[in-house]
Image (cartoon, rainbow, N blue to C red):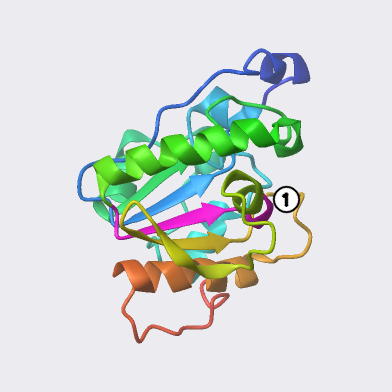
Amino acid sequence: MVRFTRAELESYRDQTMPDLVTPGVRLLFVGINPSLWTAATQTPFAHPGNRFFPALAAAGIIPRLPGFADGLSDEERRKFLERGLGVSNLVRRATARADELTRAELRDGAERLAVNVARWQPRVVAIVGLTAYRQGFDRPKATAGRQSEALAGAELWAVPNPSGLNAHDTIASLADAYAAPARAAGILPASDRREPDARL
């Protein structure tokens, strides 16, 4: 696995990463903002301790676990996109922790996201992080799951943050949470209720 020194990672602070989206996206996952590791590898949710890709694999949303911590290969990116999946972020700049962002940045990011969703037209948008959803969309009492409002015509969900700093969730519980919007988007069959940890 690729390794970075603290100084190397710090050199990526405030850098941005392009969205991982192509026409025909059905399910758009929206992270809070890139981590320094993500900016360094140009791969979303790339930190070795992040459970995003393990949870997707456990849910059957992707067929196998990619080597995400080293950065996705071109082939892995292509297969991810061909599944109808995409990834964006509320805030584009990289930080060491999400709590370094301001509420104004999150709200500006939510407005920018709405414009992008109107252009990309995914079926479902899943905001990955309930606190970020509450702050960015000014919904302080929102709960996880499908939201009553749509976003630029897309079904809107709020799902748990897969960061290793989120000790409340496991790969199994994240897989279950991510499978629900995947079923809504048609990525998984509507009747697919497999045990989320069966593939681990």
Residue 62, image x and y in percent?
Answer: 39, 60
Residue 119 visible in the displayed image: yes
Q: Which residue is mark 1?
A: 164
Image side of residue 100 versus residue 52, left or right = right
The amino acid on which the numbered mark 1 sits, given as a three-letter code, is Gly
Quadrant of residue 48 within the rendered picture: top right
Q: Is residue 97 left or right of residue 171?
A: right
In the image, 147 versus 160, the foreground residue is: 147
Which residue occupies 66% across, 12% down? 11
The magenta-colored residue range is 122-131
User: Could you tell me residue 4's position as x and y percent?
Assistant: 68, 23
Q: Is residue 41 left or right of residue 49?
A: left
Q: Is residue 195 above or below residue 17?
A: below
Q: How many marks?
A: 1
Quick check: 146 above or below 131? below
> Residue at point 40% right, 64% down?
61
Q: Residues within 10 Å of mark 1 (few under 14, many from 20)?
A: some
Give the image quarter of residue 176.
bottom right
Q: Secondary structure at mark 1?
A: loop
Q: Is residue 126 magenta?
A: yes
Is residue 114 part of the magenta span, yes or no?
A: no
Residue sitting at x 59%, y 41% = 32
Check the picture and name the quadrant holding the C terminus: bottom right
The residue shown at (63%, 39%) is 47
Q: Is residue 31 above or below residue 134?
A: above
Q: 111 left or right of 119?
A: right
**Quadrant where the image shows the N terminus:** top right
Q: Is residue 2 visible?
A: no
In the figure, residue 153 lies in which quadrant?
A: bottom left
Residue 64: % across, % down: 42, 59
- Taking depth in this image into account, of 47 and 106 the one nearest to the observer is 106
